[in-house]
Amino acid sequence: MVYTPYDWNQAVGQRTEYIEERIRDGSPVVGISLPEGALLVTVHQTQRKVYEIYDRIMFGGIGNQSDLETARNAAIDFAHREGFQRSPDDVTLQRLVGSALSPAIKRAFADPFNVPFVFRGLFVELADRREEDSFGWINYDGEYAFHHDFCVIAGSLEAENEVTRLLHAAAPGVSTLEGGVRLALEGWATGKIQARRRIDDETEGERREDPATALRDALSTGTLEAALLERGTRRESKFRLLKPAETEAAAAEYR
Amino acid sequence: MGRAVWPAPAGGFRELVGDPLRPVETGSRGAAAGAVPAALDTHGTTVIAVKYRDGVLNVGDRRATANMAIMFDRAEKVIALDDYTLIAISGSFARAMEIVRYLKHAFKYYSRTQLQEMSLDGKVSEVSRAIAGNLPMALQGIGAFIPIVSAYDPRTNEGRIFFYDGMGARFETAEFGAAGSGSERIRGAFDYIIRTKAPFREMPLDDALRECLVLLDIAADLDAATGGYAKVLPVAKTITVEGVSEISAEEMQEAVGSLPGGR
């Protein structure tokens, strides 16, 4: 059988469609940089979605859980190997996302004889100062981008743009952990609705959904998950999952 | 990141980095047949761990020596491996620091890949393996080190102290542990304090710290390789249910100042 450029093009298109269909209903992960540290917030149903990768790096993802695990473990392996053989200071988001993960994910995506990664990831690197915190967005095809201040991954790029607009306007004014969780939840609901709306557009027409209602629905069956890389802590580990008591004030109105 | 061959992670950091605990080849055939000069190997002494009312206190002097030379008087010998584990090192500084780096990464690697903390038993066993793996070097007369490991055990809600021999055998102590060249000189003094004053585990932190500083000063009087507190303040760290915490220079200065003859 001859494999033509047309076949390759079509295969890439089909793979893109295959992946996007599967991540579209994923639960967004919203990252916001705060004076206290870098925050990741999502709502999960069963499995955890936010993880510690290295001393100053954490990760949240949407997609197939086993693919998230593969990406997570690859990131942990790279970070610990480099951190031990060189220095923890040499483990940076640039190297992790740009040099280690992106080419490998791109190879997997472009290989027509393997099942592609159903995955979109958000890595966060804590710096000494809020404005220097980094967010590394990486897509299932290996594309990646770095941001400061805030970042989001959601079920569709349109949904991410919608949340980005919201965060762009509101994130600079947030200075407390509670405010950060509240804004992140708002962003989460916006992303969830926007991604869902696209599905509805294609099937039964546009349906307006209220973010508060979407959050209330999600929190009635799911679990609010928030993790912080703490800037000022003296603990060995800067990563910690926030306790329910720390997020309750922000989530109370949706209970 | 090939999917077909990607192994399920078991949390083993040693496999990931290619056994960093293997002995360094020196080309020597042991001390009797051309030993490595002792001046090549910088040593750290003396470290102390005692239980106190709220957990475990570790105190170490700051001196590092190579043969008769004082190489460094700001050596850090009490190091946090994670938020609930301290290691106090004595012996070969180079080898100890490399193994401490390994242990820190190994414990964190395990907890991050497995999404659960390594058990305390798993941690102290890993230290045993590190010491045992270092034995060929120690037999060549270089690179020997002996640590004390202290931890807060969340299952029993108490501080625990483990000490080791040169082959990696571990022993748990009820009250105190000490390692390094000055430790043997003061061993009986620990028992004297326990019998005549109070068990360390019943002491508040201030009292335990003062006793440790006196012990360290006695070790410095009797052992040339131990620095004491006269010139450079020792380092002291605690582990409690809240985790690892360092006693500040100001608090240390205050404790030294309260001792008879203290500055």
Image (tube, coloured by chain):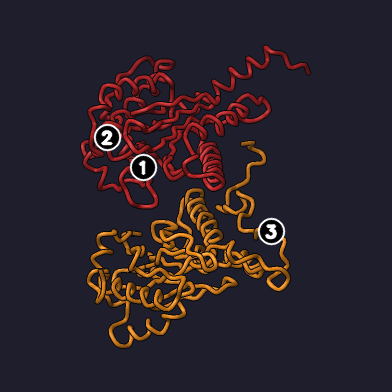
Q: Mark 1 is on which residue type? A: Leu
Q: A4 or B53, which is in the foreground? A: B53
| Residue located beneath label 1 in the image | A229
Q: Residue at x 63, y 24 (%)?
A: A110
Q: Position of residue A237 (x, y in %)?
A: 39, 50
Q: Chain of mark 3?
A: B
- Looking at the image, residue A2 lies above or below residue B211: above
Q: Mark 3 is on which residue type? A: Glu
- Chain for colour red: A
What distance separates the C-alpha of mark 1 from that of mark 3? 41 Å
Q: Position of residue B124 (x, y in %)?
A: 50, 66
| Residue located beneath label 2 in the image | A180
On the same chain: label 1 and label 3?
no
Q: Chain of mark 2?
A: A
| Labels 2, 3: front one | 3
| Quarter of the image where one finds residue A227 | top left
Q: A119 or A58, which is in the foreground? A: A58
